[in-house]
Amino acid sequence: MSWSTIFNHPLGLLGADSFPFLAMLSSDDSDIFINGLLGSFAAALVIISVMVVVALLTRYRAWRTLWFDWLTSTDHKKIGIMYVVLALVMLTRAIAEAVLMRAQGAVGLGGGFLSSDHFAQLFSTHGTIMIFFMAMPFLTGLINYVVPLQIGARDVAFPILNSISLWLTAAGAALVMISLVVGAFSTGGWFGYPPYTETLYNPGIGVDYWIWSLTLASLGSTLTGINIAVTIYKKRAPGMKLYYMPLFTWTALCTAIMMIFAMPPLTVVTLQLALDRYLDFHFFTNGLGGNQMNFLNMFWLFGHPEVYILILPAFGVYSEIFSTFSGKVLFGYKSLVWATISIAFLSFLVWLHHFFTMGQSGHINAVFGIASMLIGIPTGVKIYDWMWTMLRGRIRFSVPMIYSLAFIFLFVIGGITGIMLANPILDYQVHNTVFLVAHFHNMVVPGVLFGMLAGYTFWFPKAFGFRLDERWGRISAYCWIFGWMGAFFPLYILGLMGLPRRSVAYEQASYVPLEIVAFVGALLVAAALMALVIQLWVSIKYREKNRVFVGDPWNGRSLEWATSAPPPEYNFPVVPSINDRDAFTAAKEFGVGYQEPDAYVNIEIPQNSAMGPVFGGTSFLLAFGLVWQIWWLVILTGLITIGTLVMRGFQRDTLKIIPAEAVCRTHQHWIQAARLALPIKRSQEHTAANKGRAAIETVEVPT
Amino acid sequence: MISELFKRLEFYLDARQNKEIFIYPGLNLGVEHSDAHTQAEATVFGFWVFLMSDAIIFGMAFATYATLLHGTADSPGPRELYHLGPIFIETLLLLTSSFTFGMASIAMKYKHPTSRLVGWLLITLVLGVVFLGMELNDFRAMFAAGGLPTQSGFLSGFFGLVPLHGLHVMAGCIWLVCMLGQIAVHGLDSETKLGLLRLALFWHFLDIVWIFIFSVVYLAGLA
């Protein structure tokens, strides 16, 4: 790179042919035309959605609110909500891609309508989005919202860092989205194995989009991990021992620690691939001493802990839900804690099972196979604990519980196929088939996604002050469950029949019937997503009748239910003192759930900060500049980023004070509401009578 | 005498129970700094956690280097490219800079005049910059001898590891300049102190990483 390349090509590699729409028009090939049409349709959807959002914001004069109340906010609750919004938006795109792929599968006998390149882009973006821009933001959002409340803290340890993490993730997601409009995404899968992703085989910019979106996401997640771990270690309310923490907080802690250790290998491996592609290094090339196994080892050294980073918070959500909706203390609390810790630990010892077939000796495979099977033990402990929690409880079949029950059944099936795959001999047979696809979707959909959706339903009233519509929630849940079963059980059979994964078309007519079943399943999943949108719409429309201002609609057990819904900015007017597990249940039973403190004090909380949005903007442009090799943009945004950091160091007085009178007023208002509200029984949970005050009902637990 | 000893022991045990001293290695904000908020506690602890994460990044770079060591692909290897002389001097420079930063921390802790603190920091900065200059010179000499990262896997591994440390040192130097600026603008307020505390950790951490580079890359490469 010299100065002349910087100034002679101000737009880098960008040209008219970078836009799929224009490329489509200039081609006479009908195949390119159909794929171009689909691509352009998707691009148009992105542009139109952005325009609609902009128009709505202008129409309702919401720009100021958006900027001051949300984008620059350092409140962990708002950041958590923004994470979940990001996750839901990205979920929509990735589901659309999934349906498209299954549609291609249904007509894929000897061809289909998608080109292999387009298909490869679809499974690459689908995987990348679902892992990094759906599941990760979703769980980070829930953790962000719930954990500080559960441990009785006012905010996370580093509120501005929290905002920066959100914005880095959002910038990565934006990069994936813009790849629809400008250029094309990688075709190398969500894992991007070299040498296929090296410049020799992939000279275009697709892989670079993948590299930089992942780098941004992994940096964001590393910082999130640090933030959550420090929050849980240092910000717990007085008296809250580690063993008093709710299980969701425990899983959040383990996930955070795993993020701290597992994200760096991903950062390293994507940057090394970038060095290979941009500066002709030889980390992973075929010749000149490169070693592709390094990529595999490091990628899965991240990738395997990653799947437990995803599943542990979901386990945490299920633990809260089983206990709350059975009206019982969580069974085997300590065993659940230790099972979580064991899973987190073991997850670092099994990465090699992702490439049993890559030629290492049988002994090594055996060791990793056994280690992988071991994970079944703590997971089994958890399953039994949850079932014992339900035993003789008074179970309510509400939406979160429906997800949780489906999870138990389906996750066990996924676990069993996992044990099958942990055996290298079996793995050799099915590794490159859709059996594997069915297995990991079995873990991440009924495991992670159901958990996230259950958590979304569970905590929504806390975050927004009104319950979600129960009927549409159930429709959505059943569509998810049966849609998932329809889409993936056939893949187990197809895999055993030998259908290779990641292939756009096939030649065996015997695959067709099951492919069609899978497509129908995928349509049902799309319907589930629609139902989720309708649920949100209906719930907002009838919000007044579903208000739960007092804040405890489900007779919750942990501290987050001890605040108003939505909670004030500072969460707790007086930091609570804890001397038991299930702190709020204990308080309610002793009749001290809604008490006035002796005195109110001034509360210091961090001011809003533009650091996050600035980082989001610059890192997005920096990555975009790197993808298209627009070097002046890279230098400029790099300097702005560093400059912002330096300036921040010079800033003082970053706190604002909420005066005691204001705290008192807010709290009194809530206490009055709580006293006026009629405590309701669980049988009235879904009626308008539920204002968020729970009646004490004793459940007889046989000894 | 003995009862005095027991009293002291009791005091320390007591303090440990209250987690007031020795929470983690390094300067602790203990009993006498309790007004410097509990936030300071979390900030420093958070930085330790960050360093742990950064250590993994270096660990991966080391592992990459180790596995690519034999992938020289007929281009120059360690014996042709490494020269212990300058590397030894660089090691001394970096170790000395850690010592001088330690002196700076002491000057801060015992409230010596700010000029003394600034003096130690400036010496540290100079040592860091000289280290970087010498390292760049090493790389230039390697390039001249045909040791470019584009030549082989081994050289990619080398240039993926050693300059990574160099970049960290550069970041440390920039940070040090910023801290001097903060001292000039704000004096030694608690935020500046916290910044210096974290920078010190960062600086010593880089020193430790360099010890590994010195042993694993250079000494082992020439052995």
Image (tube, helix red, strand yellow):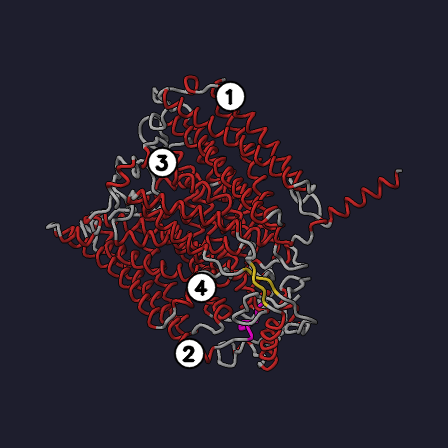
Q: Does A551 lie within the magenta span?
A: yes
Secondary structure, mark 1, is helix
Stretch in magenta: A550-556
Q: CA distance from mark 3 to mark 1?
A: 26 Å
Relative placement, left or right, of B222 versus A507 is: right
Q: CA distance from mark 4 to mark 1?
A: 54 Å
Say few, some or many: other residues with alpha carbon within 10 Å of mark 2 (under 14 / 14 to 19 / 20 or more).
some
Q: Nearer the viewer, residue A667 or A431?
A: A667
Q: Quadrant of residue A626?
A: top left
Residue at which label 3 appears? A275
Instruction: State whether discs 4 and 2 lie on one chain.
Output: yes
Q: CA distance from mark 3 to mark 4?
A: 37 Å
Q: Nearer the viewer, residue A379 or A605?
A: A605
Q: Quadrant of the N terminus of chain A?
A: top left
**Three-letter amino acid code at disc 1?**
Leu
**Three-letter amino acid code at disc 3?**
Leu
Discs 2/1, front: 1
